[in-house]
Amino acid sequence: MPLDRRTLIAGLSLVAMPRLATAAPAPRRFPIWPGSPPGMPSPGVADAFVQRSPNGPADDIAWPHIATPMLTVCPAARPTGAAVLLIPGGGYARVAVGREPSPVARWFAAQGVTAFDLLYRLPHDGWAAGPDAPLQDAQRALRVIRARAGEWGIDPTNIAAMGFSAGGHLAARLAARSALVTYGPVDAMDAQPTTLLTVGLLFPVITMAQPFAHAQSKRELLGRDADAGRAARYSAERDLPSDMPPTFLGHAADDPVVPVANSIAMFQAVHALPRPAELHIVETGGHGPRLIAPDGTPHPWLARFATFAHRHGLKIPGDDA
């Protein structure tokens, strides 16, 4: 899909915008719960990670077991007051995120948006909440960011989320289920709301219904024998609230892992409310394309999301038209 002039100008401004040489606070990684997360199974869970590639960078890892959900904050050197919660994928079988800020997090931080990478729990470890354990972590992460917003110069009303692949399913549920109580309060931070200003979903898993469900995500989240009712309950395009946050979607038509029909279904559902929605489908690109090039150039989806999010109130440089 060719870039229009407005998107191209906005994207180039995001890449080339000059910034003062102000040192940002150091990235930091920290647990989101004050103790064990709710519903710890017996005999317990141990954190474990694996290298994603035998010859890859040391921090190119994925977590098949998570006992300690974490946030990795990448503070902006010149914060605009905006923040974004980044939710990685892994088919709900693992979480593909390192211990250092992701390239996408660093790109957002360079735009003045403080970014947080989320390491969330997986249902197969036996948590009491089952398929809602990841949502518990996403909701808690958002509350922690809001409660501690002053530490990073964040406006607590100016927070977006972006999810990738199965993380897109979790981000979509976070956006659509802000009213869903998934756990009892554990401290004062849980008085914070879980609403989002806007949400971005890139090559997302959305539906749990056939024929377009991503088989691994559905199996890991719901089990092998989920009936149609359970699948419908966890299909992110179903039962959206009337105040669904403005939703941006990006997908490749040739994605061999998660059918593009997932993003189309989500766009149609949000648009039908009606609520703001934007969908960008490219002809080729497969699943999980590199979002930050080696020279630091962002994928057009990121530039387009920045423009979309800016239009809907996120404090990020963009095109005001």
Image (spheres, grey):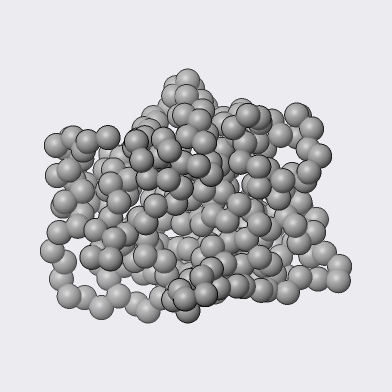
Q: Which image quadrant is residue 133 in?
A: bottom right
Left of 20 or right of it: where is 252?
right
Q: Is residue 78 visible?
A: yes
| Residue drawn 41% across the image and 66% down it | 102
Which part of the image, by quadrant, shows the N terminus?
top left
Could you tell me residue 308's position as x and y percent? 31, 40
| Residue drawn 42% across the image and 70% down it | 101
Left of 255 or right of it: where is 315?
left
Q: Which image quadrant is residue 65 in?
A: bottom right
Count the marks: 0
Left of 229 or right of it: where is 260?
left
Please name whichever residue, 13 or 258, is drawn nearer the observer in this view of the structure.
258
Point out the residue furthest to the right here.
42
Please name whichever residue, 130 or 192, is drawn nearer the observer in this view of the structure.
130
| Residue drawn 64% across the image and 47% down it | 217
Q: Is residue 197 above or below residue 129?
A: above
Could you tell me residue 89's position as x and y percent? 54, 54
| Residue drawn 16% across the image and 52% down it | 13
Could you tell me residue 313's position as x and y percent? 32, 43
Q: Is residue 44 above or below residue 285?
A: below
Which part of the image, by quadrant, shows the C terminus?
top left
Q: Is residue 196 visible?
A: no
Could you tell me residue 183's position as x and y percent? 72, 53
Q: Is residue 281 above or below residue 44?
A: above
Please name whichever residue, 294 or 4, is drawn nearer the observer in this view of the structure.
294
